[in-house]
Amino acid sequence: MASGLAKPLLRALAGERLSRPPWWLMRQAGRYLPEYRAVRSKAKDFVELCLTPALAAEVTLQPVRRYRMDGAILFSDILLVPHALGQRLTFREREGPVLEPIENRSGIGRLDPGQIVPRLKPVFETIERVAAALDPRTALIGFAGAPWTVATYMVEGGSSRDFRRVKGWAYRDVEGFDALIGILVDSTIKFLTAQVEAGAEVVQLFDTWAGVLPEPAFGRWVIEPTRSIVAALKQRFPDHPIIGFPRGAGLLYERYVAETGVDGIGLDPMVSSSYARERLQPLATVQGNLDPILLITGGSSLEAAVRELCRSLGGGPFVFNLGHGVLPETPPENVEALARLLAEPTAPT
Ligand code: CP3
């Protein structure tokens, strides 16, 4: 579609180099914004906020109204998939997510993969509402957690320090763990398919904990499931770009890009610009990777780092983002300063 292709984010993800990099920020909606905190306090809890379309659409649009990013990321959470599979999810203040852990093969029987799309219907309605409200140059980004990262929360019962339980299961009982990953691959395909049908123009797979797996487990639990999801989505929607974010993958970033078939690759802050430029940019559009702490720091440190990043990656297909999500302590005026900097054209290379 000609109008769709005019959106800067879609052009960059199709491999075009733009004079100004398109941008959006992971966790661009959230607690750093006073208007988010106001809406958040109206909902009973975080899960209810995600599953109430009027509220979720409103918080999706809040950062875009303020800063005019090139992408609006759906307000939701990667843990809604286990929730829809029947694993009860709560969020505790300062503790993060809590799920009743599934620790072995017999726990898989408690999951109900048949209901994923009907149970997540409010998410698709949120997408429809945002699509109707967005201005024509902003792209709507849907997302899901990648199977490995979602499995870490399902097996550990929440956040983890050393991933002992989930790795223990994956190493001890490859077939049993594969059954869990298989359910997550199928559920993620269904979830993302319905998001695209509702109006998501780009999807991102968050593999936040990809970097805790050594080879060959990384190939089996990060690359393989991602490859299956990308292949299924590409078959249905060949023109919808997919961004993979295998945080912490280090030197395995290159294999991830080459073997999964993603169009865009989200870089964490530790990926060097020279590695990204030489090894990744020839294969995919690179996205990233400013340290989120710099957005708290602000001032001339922020400005210098943003200019340097745009200079070193702006010579090829590039989407500006952070290397991880916006932190709650971020002063909104620093995001405003970032928006102003990114509105300047990058020097021709
Ligand atoms: O990026 C966006 O603005 C869209 C919304 C979004 C949220 N979570 C909202 C959220 C997205 C894309 C996510 C993804 C997500 N959720 C990931 C992958 C990305 C990453 O950050 O690594 C993960 C691992 C989760 C799981 C999750 N959700 C955790 C561990 C927590 C608790 C930690 C925390 O920041 O509070 C959440 C809660 C959460 N998800 C909040 C938001 C705005 C904060 C909840 C609140 O408002 O009380």
Image (spheres, helix red, strand yellow):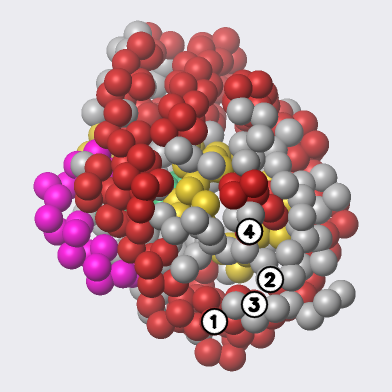
Q: Which of marks 1 and 3 is in front?
A: 1
Q: What residue type is labelled 3?
A: Val
Earlier in the chain: of badge 4 and badge 3, it is 4
Q: Residues within 10 Å of mark 4 (few under 14, many from 20)?
A: many
In the image, the residue with mark 2 has its CB under 8 Å from the nearest atom of ligand 1:
no
Residue linked to disc 1: 340
Residue type at tag 1: Arg
Q: Count residues near mark 1 (Cα–Cα under 10 Å), then give few for <14, some for 14-19, many for 20+.
A: few
Can residue 338 be seen in the rendering of this structure? yes
Q: Is residue 131 above or below residue 138?
A: above
**Contact (CB < 8 A) between labels 3 and 2?**
no
Discs 1/4, front: 4
The x and y percentages for residue 20 are 68, 71
Tag 4's secondary structure? helix
Q: Which residue lies at the image location 68% right of the left edge and 53% below the top edge?
A: 11
Mark 1–mark 3 Cα distance, whole angstroms, equals: 11 Å
**Disc 3: which residue:** 306
Q: What is the x, y in percent for residue 116?
A: 35, 20
Q: To which residue does mark 4 refer?
A: 8
Residue 156 in view (yes/no): no
- Whichever of callouts 1 and 4 sits on the residue coming sooner in the sequence is 4
Amino acid type indicated by mark 2: Arg
* Residue named by callout 2: 20
Total number of numbered labels? 4
* Residue lying at 36% horizontally and 40% vertically, measured from the top left: 128
Magenta region, residue range: 32-51
Q: At numbered mark 1, what does the secondary structure look like: helix, strand or loop?
A: helix
The residue located at (28%, 48%) in the rendering is 56
Asked whether mark 4 lies closer than 8 Å to ligand 1, one says no
Q: In this view, does 227 lie to the left or right of 27?
A: right
